[in-house]
Image: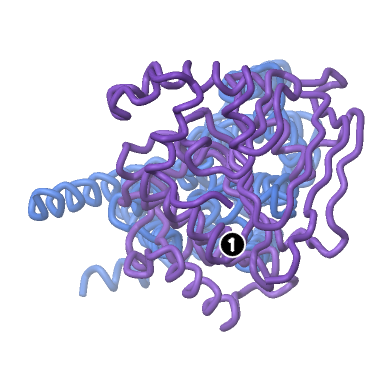
Chain colours: A blue, B purple
Amino acid sequence: MEFIETLSQMFTYTFLVRALIVGLLVSLCASLLGVSLVLKRFSMIGDGLSHVGFGSLAVATAFNWAPLAVSIPVVVLAAFLLLRLSERGRIKGDAAIALISASALAIGVFVVSKTTGMNTDVDNYLFGSILALTQQDVVLSVVLSLGVLIIFVFCYHRIFAVTFDETYARATGIPAGFYNTVLALLTALTIVLGMRMMGALLISSLVIFPALSSMWLCKRFAAVTICAAIVSLVCYVIGLVVSFVYQTPTGASIVLVNLAAFTIFYAISRLRMLRGA
Amino acid sequence: MTDPVTLITCKDLAFGYDGAPAVHDVTLTVVGGDYLCVVGGNGSGKSTLIKGMLGLLKPLAGTLCFEPDLKPSDMGYLPQQNTIQRNFPASVWEVVLSGRLGRLGLSPVYHRADREAAREALAVLGVEGLAKSGFGELSGGQQQRVLLARTLCAATDGLKLLILDEPMNGLDASAKLELYAAITALNSQQGIAIIMVTHDVQAAVDYASHILVLEGRQAFFGGTHEFQHTRVGQELIRDSCGDACESCGMAYLATPGDNRAAGATHRTGER
């Protein structure tokens, strides 16, 4: 009973309702895209993009520009760039990502220190704040995440084929490059939307954790995808409640809940293996 | 069966990257029902030629002609296995069905015809019992047969040409034999022309009707019988015998003219 009371008390706060709506949508998008990204060894792209997001947020704040209006195009551009570099650049993928993310972080810190100074804003960008969401953000997030979900569902089989065997897909006339780009674009949007709530340093965990957790237990692509989505949503809600009840930072709480889920799934898969053996 | 048609004609063909040819002067024809093995060392241009034939590279020189009735969907391709696939969380069914993707059009889901084609392809390769298994849990040989099934069900009205890039990589001896048997069956029972890249010269002699030797350029193209009587062929067979002798019981140490005797035990009848 106490739990339900806590919940109903939680959602009398508008900012928590906003956080719940945006968070659930972003978690769902991130986990669906994450399966492909992890399997394609693109996990670090999410991480790189969030750092670029931090840089662009810092610059936008410094010049008093609308944060999302600046971040979205910049991060999308970075996504294209990262994909191109990791595909055929002279610098190898992981090095390219490290290069870009460190540079973006440095630009962000540099600009912030020269303008507003290293204040709570920076702290919020890096580690997230659920107070940051405005009504407008919620609307934009809902629209964009629905867009991401629709495109994902529509391209599901194509994303599978391109993830599983890009060479074969190309040879049979499927524009693999195009679907890689779609994947990068959707990831960029998801990262930007989730970044301010989860924090630039923590958002990529929403992409990576649910996929990895469900891969311990599921052996079918569809099952992995659905399981990742459920894990992600459940972990988000638990993390949000934990952060409210124990007054802990939201982003970090959600990541820790995801870590717990990952550990539990791993333990179950080990147990299964032992029984099978 | 009607008269075999010429599926592919190459004349003085060259493919390469950034304008530098990796393989040149390729002149050959592939006729319906042929079984062509492409042999050559690393960097001899085998994979480049295959990419070119699949239309992934533009010819730097020469001509590449396909039979006008040969639609892209009549050609199947089995690429070299990549490391991502080995432990990929997908069921056999999902993998095979993905072969139908090219025919999906704008539809986001597969239809009954797609599922039937997938089921049929699994049956042809004798892996229908694996449909629900995880792809990552299969042996290397089973994985390759599942991937062959995917290629098979991609074809609309029966595959006419199947291109395989080193399909035997990483397989143990018994898995290789099984896969060769499966490929030979596709060739002889369904009349599918095969182009297979391999560095196993002995297997090429055993199974193929034609052999193409690449060394950055075309060093030999012709029938397998002819191959065994050219110097290029005899040298390659002798070299490959070096590592195969333990299994083939020294038969190939005999004079070059005799080496067909051992090969013939693996293959019944010449096309």
| Residue B230 image-quadrant placement | top right
Q: Nearer the viewer, residue B237 or A154?
A: B237
Q: Residue furthest bottom?
A: B112
Q: Residues within 10 Å of mark 1 (few under 14, many from 20)?
A: many
Tally of numbered discs: 1
Q: Is residue B132 left or right of residue B73?
A: left
Q: Quadrant of the N terminus of chain A?
A: bottom left
Q: Position of residue B101 (x, y in %)?
A: 64, 64
Q: Is residue A105 among what the camera can see?
A: yes
Q: What residue is shown with label 1?
A: B99
- Percent x, y of residue A219: 34, 57
Q: Residue at x 70, y 69 (%)?
A: B103
Please give left or right for residue B121 compared with residue B26 in the image: left
Residue depicted at 57% across the width and 28% down the height: B228
Label 1, secondary structure: give it.
helix
Residue A110: image location, x then y, percent: 68, 16
Residue A249 seen by the camera:
no
Residue A39, position as x, y percentages in the image: 48, 44
Q: Amino acid at mark 1?
A: Gly
Query: What residue is rendered at 46% in x and 68% in y?
Result: B124
The residue shown at (65%, 64%) is B159
Choose top left, top right, bottom left or bottom right for residue A9.
Answer: bottom left
**Image position of A14 with respect to B167: above or below:** below
In this view, the residue in front, B184 or A78, is B184
The chain containing the residue under callout 1 comes to: B
Q: Is residue B164 above or below residue A117?
A: below
- From the viewer's side, name the closer residue of A12 and B209: B209
